[in-house]
């Protein structure tokens, strides 16, 4: 083994340690930024080691031109995207990153497979990861593009189904499996490779179309896990240790997160893979609720009085806050109340918003202290001593109906907002959430409804609160 090979191996090992330690540091908000930098540094080292190794192998001029062009274009797109994207559009960006990662991994395997010939057959130990890479990467690519389209509004965010859709899903999945097996056994057959590619791409589309917008956190996390697995398979294909380790870490972390998200939504991950959640049919057929009997409507002044004279306030952000881009307004309201001596905290549900951690990202953008964010268990304990709970755009994650069997949200862990002494719900209408059932919180005797767009409503509340905290 040459000195260069030893150096490259050591660089990959150091990079892998950076990945693991960085991922561990990202478990808590206080160290997440440093963990992200450490993981990024490990990736820079791995890329540098790969480039040095490639130079030592005397790559062709054309190959280097393509490599450098791809690096320049990709880096420019990444920098511009990171600088220009709004925080409310981060879920779409994450889905696009998943698509790029999965597609790139599949392209690596496809190129390797298409170079095979009867004179230079591919060994079984290599054909298996190649086929898995094409299969998983293609599903990730097409599925992530559909997910990004749903999040952006290009594709309808509702559950999209057609007669016999589940049967079509099963047929396409079987075709992909059969084509995968045939490609493993006969890796020089172009027909089976193309069939595998088309079936995998089709299954990715069919898998994500039935997923409604409210379930996006789970599917984004699942596709992120798929991206990691595809990258790991690509690492086996080209013999790159750093890709294997990084991909395995992403795949494992994404799988764990997916299971946690599914549990938080009381959904089955298996039902996602075969074409949608169990509650999707109910959700699609549900009609918006316009029932206002037993609902107590509030004005901005009513809300301001409750908040200004409270000791402990908990704000519950949801998708409505993200859609209205009201994070700046909610942070301003919290700051105003804190200056008046009110203790303000935020209750974060694991699947509030459109991706895992969506609310955390939005609140971090406006510099809300990490210590003020209460996760599910801590938040539910805090509601017992809360004077006012202000719900901004959250729906199903606060519905007490989840504590009873026989409805689409049964068994779903929720924020116990109804344990607060008083409840204010800021929402545009009485329309139900994705589950398609009325939120029983809205008719709770302790609840008051302030009907407004989240940003406009918070602005009105801020103006009204100032009259009480400055007198």
Image: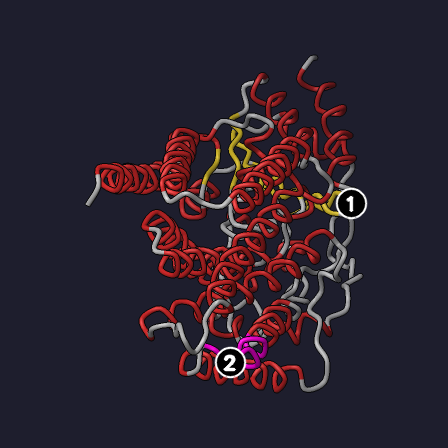
Query: Would you call the spot at circle 1 few (<14 residues within 10 Å), some (14-19), or many (20 or more)?
Result: some
The question of residue 189 being in magenta is answered with yes
Q: Is residue 80 magenta?
A: no
Task: Relative to 168, say whether 440 is above or below.
Answer: above
Q: Position of residue 410 (x, y in %)?
A: 52, 68
For this orientation, the residue located farthest to the left is 1
- What is the quadrant of the C terminus in the image? top right
Mark before the other along the chain sequence, 1 or 2: 2
**Residue sitting nearer the eye, 462 or 96:** 96
Colour treatment of the image: secondary structure
Q: Position of residue 160 (x, y in %)?
A: 71, 71
Q: Nearer the viewer, residue 280 or 137?
A: 137
* Residue at the image point whose x is 48% and y is 43% from the top: 383
Q: Decide which of 252, 314 is in the foreground and name it.
A: 252
Quadrant of the rendered structure where residue 432 is?
bottom right
What whole-number distance in Å separates the C-alpha atoms at marks 1 and 2?
A: 62 Å
Residue 420, x across and y down, in percent: 53, 44
* Place of residue 48 in the rendered image (x, y in percent of width and height, measured from the top left): 40, 35
Q: What is the magenta range? A: 188-196
SS category of the residue bearing label 1: strand
In this view, the mark in front (1 or 2): 2
User: Is label 2 in a helix, a strand or a loop?
Assistant: loop
Q: Which residue is mark 1?
A: 451
Residue 421 position by quadrant: top right
| Quarter that holds the N terminus | top left
What's the residue at 75%, 58% (across, down)?
A: 431
Q: Residue at x 24, y 38 (%)?
A: 10
Callout 1–callout 2 Cβ contact below 8 Å: no
Give left or right: position of 169 versus 117: right
Q: Is residue 276 visible?
A: no
Labelled disc at residue 189: 2
Tell me, for residue 403, which label it has, or none. none
């Amino acid at each position: 083994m040459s000195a260069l090979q030893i150096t490259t191996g050591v660089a990959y090992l150091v990079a892998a340690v950076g990945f693991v330690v960085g991922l561990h540091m990202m478990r808590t908000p206080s160290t997440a930024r440093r963990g992200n930098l450490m993981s990024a540094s490990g990736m820079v080292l791995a890329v540098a080691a790969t480039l040095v190794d490639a130079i030592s192998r005397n790559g062709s001029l054309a190959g280097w031109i393509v490599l450098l062009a791809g690096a320049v274009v990709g880096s420019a797109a990444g920098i511009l995207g990171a600088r220009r994207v709004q925080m409310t559009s981060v879920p779409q960006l994450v889905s696009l990153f998943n698509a790029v990662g999965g597609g790139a991994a599949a392209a690596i395997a496809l190129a390797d497979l298409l170079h095979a010939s009867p004179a230079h057959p591919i060994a079984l130990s290599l054909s298996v990861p190649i086929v898995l890479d094409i299969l998983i990467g293609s599903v990730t690519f097409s599925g992530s593009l559909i997910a990004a389209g749903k999040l952006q509004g290009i594709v309808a965010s509702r559950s999209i189904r057609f007669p016999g859709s589940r049967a079509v899903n099963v047929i396409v999945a079987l075709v992909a499996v059969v084509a995968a097996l045939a490609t493993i056994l006969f890796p020089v057959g172009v027909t089976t490779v193309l069939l595998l590619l088309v079936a995998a791409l089709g299954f990715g589309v069919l898998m994500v179309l039935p997923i409604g917008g409210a379930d996006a956190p789970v599917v984004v996390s699942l596709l992120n896990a798929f991206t990691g697995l595809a990258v790991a398979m690509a690492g086996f294909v080209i013999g790159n240790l750093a890709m294997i380790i990084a991909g395995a870490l992403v795949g494992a972390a994404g799988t764990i997160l997916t299971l946690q998200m599914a549990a938080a939504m009381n959904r089955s991950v298996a039902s996602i893979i075969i074409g949608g959640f169990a509650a999707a049919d109910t959700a699609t057929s549900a009609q918006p609720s316009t029932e206002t009997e037993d609902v107590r409507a509030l004005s901005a002044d009513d809300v301001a009085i409750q908040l200004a004279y409270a000791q402990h306030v908990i704000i519950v952000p949801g998708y409505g806050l993200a859609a209205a881009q009201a994070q700046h307004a909610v942070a301003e309201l919290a700051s105003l109340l804190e200056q008046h001596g009110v203790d303000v905290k935020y209750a974060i549900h694991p699947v509030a918003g459109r991706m895992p951690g969506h609310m955390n990202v939005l609140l971090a953008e406006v510099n809300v202290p990490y210590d003020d964010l209460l996760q599910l268990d801590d938040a539910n304990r805090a509601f017992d001593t809360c004077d006012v709970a202000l719900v901004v755009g959250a729906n199903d994650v606060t519905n007490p109906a989840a504590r009873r069997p026989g409805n689409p949200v049964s068994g779903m862990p929720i924020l116990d907002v109804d344990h607060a002494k008083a409840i204010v719900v800021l929402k545009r209408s009485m329309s139900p959430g994705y589950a398609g059932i009325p939120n029983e919180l809205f008719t709770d005797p302790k609840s008051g409804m302030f009907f407004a767009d989240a940003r406009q409503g918070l602005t009105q509340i801020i103006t009204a609160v100032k009259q009480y905290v400055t007198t």
